[in-house]
Amino acid sequence: MHYPWWYVPFLTSPMLIAAIATIHIFVAMYAVGGGMFLAVEAHYAHRNQDRPYLAYLRDHAWFFILLTVVFGAITGVGIWWTIGLASPLATEALIHIFVFGWAMEYVFFVIEIASAFLFYYFWDRLPPKTHTIFGYIYAVSAWISLDRARQLFRDSGRDPGASRLEPDRSLGMAGTVAERRDRPLGE
């Protein structure tokens, strides 16, 4: 199949991918750190029954959801959109090679979204212990989502024979990295 050619003046398409991905990673790191902050501090505020601090945390949680869930999802889709336009064949290869890794990341991202909304929208309606548990579920799922993406690419730039010859069990696929790279797509 022949794909159309995409020209990005002045910036080039690889630089656009890098710019969007860098913004996305900053947001993802804030999601992990900020999620842990909100969970720990909500736990502290509930335990001490500190109403002014809980009000501050609720306001911060609104900003946090807008930034991490909404803007993070937009930049995540933006990465796929730009790589799909810049190099459709490479995007197809990424999907085929890392399909189970991406699926695991997306499952944890859905858990992240659900727990963030439950944490914010049921702020005063849940018992403090349950509310805090949703905060910790968010923090852990955000960390796993970011760590899963990091593990997908940890050896992608090295010689596969020099870095890992054992079967790659972290992605749930049999065979070595070298074996998977030598197979044609679709196998």
Image (spheres, rainbow, N blue to C red):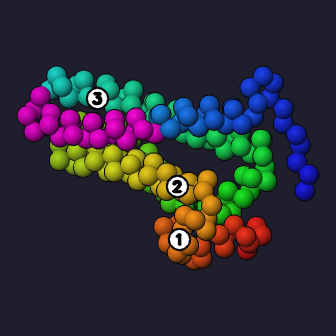
Q: Quadrant of the N terminus?
A: bottom right
Image vertical order of residue 183 relative to residue 155, above or below:
below
Q: Which mark is residue 58?
A: 3
Gap between marks 2 and 3 measured at Cα: 36 Å
Q: Is residue 101 left or right of residue 12?
A: left
Q: What's the amino acid at mark 2?
A: Arg
Q: What stretch of residues is rendered in magenta?
A: 28-50
Tag 2–tag 3 contact (CB < 8 Å): no
**Residue occupied by mark 1:** 168
Name the residue rendered at 17%, 47% in the picture. Answer: 129
Q: Main secondary structure of the magenta part?
A: helix
Inspect the magenta stretch and tell me whether residue 27 lies in it. Answer: no
Residue that extends furthest to the front in the rendered view of this protein:
162
Viewer-nearest of labels 2 and 3?
2
Q: Position of residue 181 (x, y in %)?
A: 69, 66
Mark 3 nearby-residue class (10 Å; few <14, some 14–19, many ≥20): some
Q: Which mark is residue 32?
A: none
Q: Which mark is residue 154?
A: 2
- Of callouts 2 and 3, which one flags the residue occurring earlier in the amino acid sequence? 3
Q: What's the amino acid at mark 3?
A: Arg
Q: Position of residue 26 (x, y in %)?
A: 47, 34
126 or 137, nearer to the observer: 137
Image vertical order of residue 38 relative to residue 170, above or below:
above
Q: What's the amino acid at mark 1?
A: Asp
Q: Position of residue 178 (x, y in %)?
A: 65, 69
- Of callouts 1 and 2, which one flags the residue occurring earlier in the amino acid sequence? 2
167 or 28, nearer to the observer: 167
Disc 3 is placed on an element classified as: helix
Name the residue rendered at 33%, 46% in the picture. Answer: 139
Disc 2 is placed on an element classified as: loop
